[in-house]
Image (cartoon, rainbow, N blue to C red):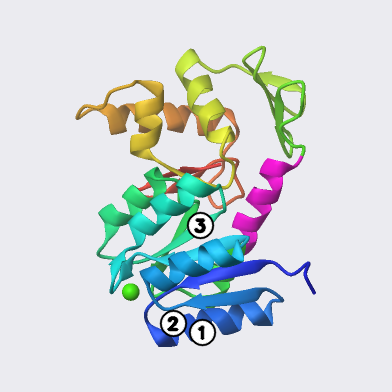
């Protein structure tokens, strides 16, 4: 019973809140519904959920501020719900540490897949896949942080300095969407009008070198207009 994952759902629209609650319960999770910002904050601190699904547009506050409070407290995975028109809110939320986003209207299957993936990522961080000797492993891909080397199925992939830095940065938050802005700030320290283009060129090269094929499962996914996900 207590091994059930507890998921806080902060959503002011009653129908959506009930729908998400029913989906979660059907999949064996315990849903904790919250109707607004104040309620969400209170339930977060009293229930200590394993994951938070957070609507950004709340009647008594901004979901982004609640995300800030959660991040000051913990690394609990947060999936942000937002309407398509709030693109900049979504990017801000990801930069503030949201793990993922789902755009309304969403499909039930999509939301549940994101929930499973976020919980997996959380387990991953507390798990063993970044090992003590400083290597990262994802299927056939191995990154040796100490030696700054990358291997696929034991053969070394030659990356430029910048390509390695980008890949290494993404690998430190697997499963999470990392925004263009966050990567640019990390790698170049500044951003100008050419930064996104520069990032895209580097990323195209990385993906090619990692053997990316369209329509197949790849190590790095492109979240169009937002960022990348390892
Ligand atoms: Ca709302």
Q: Is residue 114 visible?
A: no
Which numbered disc, 1 or 3, marks the residue closer to the eye? 3
Q: Position of residue 53 (x, y in %)?
A: 49, 66
Identify residue for label 1. 19
Between residue 41 and residue 205, name the one nearer to us: 41
Q: Which residues are magenta?
A: 116-127
Is there CB contact under 8 Å for labels 1 and 2?
yes
- Label 1, label 2: how far apart the Cα atoms are: 5 Å
Chain-order first, disc 3 or disc 2? 2
| Quadrant in the rendering for residue 194 | top left
- Which residue is found at the position 53% from the left and 21% from the top? 164
Label 3 residue near ligand 1, CB within 8 Å:
no
- Badge number at residue 78: 3
Answer with mark 1 or mark 3, whichever residue precedes in sequence: 1
Query: Does the magenta segment cover residue 145?
Result: no
From the top left corner, tell me how far across and down residue 103 is, in percent.
Answer: 39, 66
Which residue in the protein does label 2 denote? Answer: 16
Q: Are marks 1 and 3 in contact (CB under 8 Å)?
A: no
Q: On the picture, is 175 further left or further right than 16?
A: right
Q: CA distance from mark 1 to mark 3?
A: 18 Å
With 132 as the anchor, is 212 left or right in this view?
A: left
């Amino acid at each position: 019973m207590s091994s059930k994952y507890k998921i806080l759902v902060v959503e002011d629209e009653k129908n959506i809140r009930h729908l998400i609650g029913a989906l979660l319960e059907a999949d064996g999770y315990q849903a904790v519904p919250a109707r607004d910002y104040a309620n969400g904050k209170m339930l977060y601190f009293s229930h200590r959920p394993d994951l938070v699904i957070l609507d950004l547009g709340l009647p008594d506050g901004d979901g982004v501020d609640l995300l800030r409070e959660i991040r000051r407290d913990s690394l609990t995975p947060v999936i942000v719900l937002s309407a398509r028109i709030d693109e900049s809110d979504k990017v801000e939320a990801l930069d503030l540490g949201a793990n993922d986003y789902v755009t309304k209207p969403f499909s039930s299957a999509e939301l549940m897949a994101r929930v499973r993936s976020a919980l997996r990522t959380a387990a991953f961080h507390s798990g063993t896949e970044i090992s003590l000797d400083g290597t990262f492993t994802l299927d056939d891909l191995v990154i040796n942080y100490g030696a700054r080397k990358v291997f696929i199925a034991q053969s070394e992939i030659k990356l430029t300095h910048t390509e390695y830095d980008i890949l290494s940065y993404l690998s430190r938050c697997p499963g999470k969407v990392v925004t263009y802005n966050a990567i640019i700030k990390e790698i170049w320290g500044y951003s100008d009008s050419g930064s996104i283009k520069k990032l895209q060129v580097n990323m195209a090269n990385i993906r090619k070198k990692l053997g990316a094929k369209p329509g197949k499962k790849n190590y790095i996914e492109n979240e169009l207009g937002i960022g990348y996900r390892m």
